[in-house]
Image (tube, rainbow, N blue to C red):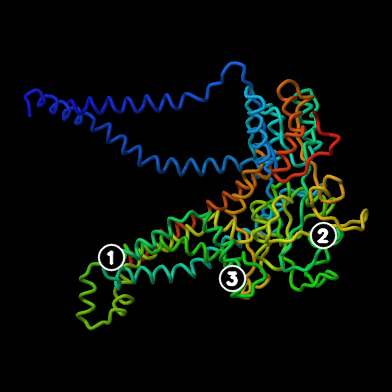
Amino acid sequence: MSKTRLPLRAGIAQGLDKCEPVIQLLIKLSGWSAIIFVVAIFFFIFREAWPILGRVDWGAFFFSNDWIPNPAEGNQPKYGAASMIYGTFAVTIFSMIIAVPLGLGAAIYISEFAKGKSKEALKVLIELLAAIPSIVWGFIGLMILGPLLQKLTGASVGVNLLNASIIVALMALPLIVSISEDALRAVPDSFREAGLALGASRWEIVYKVLFPAAKSGLLAGCMLGVGRAVGETMAVLMASGNADKIPDNFFNPALLLMEVKTLTATIASELGDTAYGDDHYRMLFVIGILLLFISVVINVVSDLVVKGVKKEANG
Amino acid sequence: MKKMIRLLALSGAVVAILLAAGCSGSSQAEGEETISITGSDTLLQVGLAWAEAYREVDPNVIVSVNGGGSGIGIKALINDTVQIANSSRKIKDTEFAAIKEKTGKEPVEHIVGYDGIAVFTHKENPMKKISMANLKEIFGDGGSVANWEDLEGSGMTGEISLVSRSNTSGTYAYFKKAVCGKGVEFKKGAKSMPGSTAVVELVSTTKNAIGYSGMGYKNDHVNWLAVYDENNADAVEPTVDNVKAGKYPIARPLYLYTVGEPEGAVATYINWIKSKAGQGILVTEKFVPIADDQITK
């Protein structure tokens, strides 16, 4: 180190010290920016939907499934979103029925029973599922899973609720698996050792010791999966059939083989072709408000559930 | 210190190169003219093919083409952001009035080709022909045909699976008007597929399906139906010759709209589109050319 370098280093160190408040400000701004972006999104969607909110026929919007924004000559446009609301809920519920047991099972296996190389390989493979673009999932649903389902179930059409639910479940799976696996790993080994010492079998340790201990993390993972399922757009656009249908009987399993339509797919397929400021354009933003509302409710509920579960665990 | 100087010099050089690369190529040379075109997605592929071929014909004219839908194109014409609007449907009266009001000139329609909409069925569907009246009963709201057995001589049973397009599509709007008629919507359970190819893909894998798409989208995995109506008892297939002769009932003209009569480079371009060269490109893109006596040059 030559003598000429020392003063420069000292100078830089002094300069960085002076920069400290600037760096603190930048970090604070980054944190605030998250809140600002979310508020900005809410503001943007409300602003675009605002002019039509007073004119919306809310009864028809929530209970009619006549979505006809481009009617035949002489007819009035209709904006009934009931089939889309049903579709979004149906796809979310059924995809979670498939994804949660599979995801938790995979997480338990990876965390407790897999060893060394197979553990790493499984983790990588599941992450690979997450890397597949959602439009590719859509094509898999339309071209591969569709005909397969027709063969296996005798359905008259391959793009239906079951198809969309399976595809969305596979997309949400990596999320549920990685967060649940983290939650299980966070449980201290002392818990497992205590269970073993008391004579519990490995499976008993999993559902009597680990599940209660990792409850909040596991639930958080599942709620994130739900959020993913609600927001999925491109895959359901291709694989769900996009038909304005609502089943007459919600207890008949045949509804799984019926086409559905989701809120997200409708916005994706129609917004690009509407004229700015049109009634149709604004109604799509009203659907956007509904989606935001559903997401907020899911997040608030999951927050409360996770907090409640944490309290239970600590209290 | 030396390391820092080297690092600064290197980053400076990289930035300079990027700036040079980014800045060149977008400046317009002397004497170059740009024609902006927006509109129908049906016409997007052929519009881009025309623009690319025209570079060889007149290198001084740059034609830029965008999609977005026929409605978007005509709106751009109203707002004077484009010189030509591509449209796969006729201009509405409200749009005509809006252009006249805003620009003082009337929009001028140029027919540059035709597109036949084919009705596709599964490879195993034995039906070969269908009447326009039956198509209305199948696709139209309130129509009496919901199952294949309701159709005389269909040879199939089971619920008919309707494959349609998204409601913002020009193909959707045209087929609804041509087949269902005035004031009639599509049947409620029709599936809205995102794109002409998706319709054909779904029909090819669904035995009970019937769907519509541009004639150019036919592939070896689907059949198309010959259509007859009250004007012509002979069922006509959507081939190029039949559409050109005006025999196929579900065919629509493809339009270009300009504000007032086109002048200068725009007029030359539209003329070239209607010439043998332009129409040849139209045929390669699987559309139907205008009648021989309309072809210019």
**What's the distance in space between the residues labelled 1 and 2, CA to CA?**
61 Å
| Quadrant of the image occupied by residue A13 | top left
Question: Disc 3 on helix, strand or loop?
Answer: helix
Please say whether residue B16 is visible from this viewpoint.
yes
Q: Is residue A64 visible?
A: no
Quadrant the C terminus of chain A occupies: bottom left
Query: Marks 2/3: CA distance?
Result: 29 Å
Q: Are marks 1 and 3 on the same chain?
A: yes
Label 2 crowding class (10 Å Cα cut-off): few <14, some 14-19, many 20+? some
Amino acid type, mark 3: Leu
Residue B234, position as x, y percentages in the image: 90, 58
The location of residue B92, given as percent across then percent down, is: 79, 38
| Between B243 and B149, the one nearer to me in the picture | B243
Residue topped by disc 2: B135
Total label count? 3
Residue at image position (29%, 72%) is: A112
